[in-house]
Amino acid sequence: MKLGQKIRQLREEKGLSLNGLAEEASISKAYLSQLENDVSKQPSAEILLKIASALGITIADLLDQPVRVYAEDFEDEDIPNALREFIDERGEALDIQKEDVRMLMNIRYRGNQPKGIEEWEHILQTIRYVMKKG
């Protein structure tokens, strides 16, 4: 999906008018319209940040480029070794985000956390499946 289409889709999902998003992002309505219609190409990082912030998302989300998460990103946090291994081994393939890791850190089954990579993956996939159905 082109950037302009993505901006329009996210704007409409948030229930914002063109003028509303332009005001929130502190950019002109005309420029935003040009971006949405792919007339203006390659906005600056500053403009992308303004639009993403106004939409309540990250630039990576806006560009459909997820940020790779590594276990070392959570050095100061008490993450079980099996979850660290899961993140490093399968994080990219499963598009694991920081929010996923924070959620998984709180998972307990019968009072215990999963003990292996396969268990972590099963839990993550199950949660994603249930969330999609919901």
Image: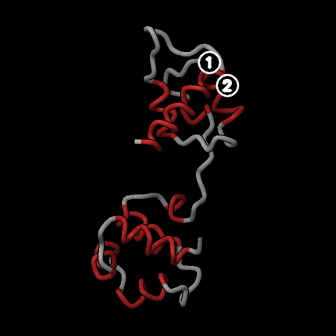
Q: State yes or no: discs 1 and 2 in contact (Cβ < 8 Å).
A: yes
Name the quadrant of the C terminus: top left
What's under tag 2, amino acid-wise? Glu
Residue located 46% across and 32% down the image: 102
Residue located 65% across and 37% down the image: 91
Task: From this view, report whether residue 90 is shown above or below residue 63.
Answer: above
What's under tag 1, amino acid-wise? Asn
115, 31: nearer the viewer: 115
Residue located 56% across and 16% down the image: 114
132, 35: nearer the viewer: 132
Identify the residue position indicated by label 1 in the image: 81
Across and down, in percent, residue 84 comes to 62, 25
Q: Using the image, tell me which numbered label, if any, was put on residue 85.
A: 2
Across and down, in percent, residue 125 comes to 57, 33
Residue located 64% across and 40% down the image: 94
50, 123: nearer the viewer: 123
Across and down, in percent, residue 48 comes to 48, 71
Quarter holding residue 19: bottom left
Q: Using the image, tell me which numbered label, if any, was put on residue 71.
A: none
- Cα distance between the residues tagged 1 and 2: 6 Å
Task: Classify 10 Å Cα crowding around label 2: few (below 14), some (14-19), many (20 and above).
Answer: some
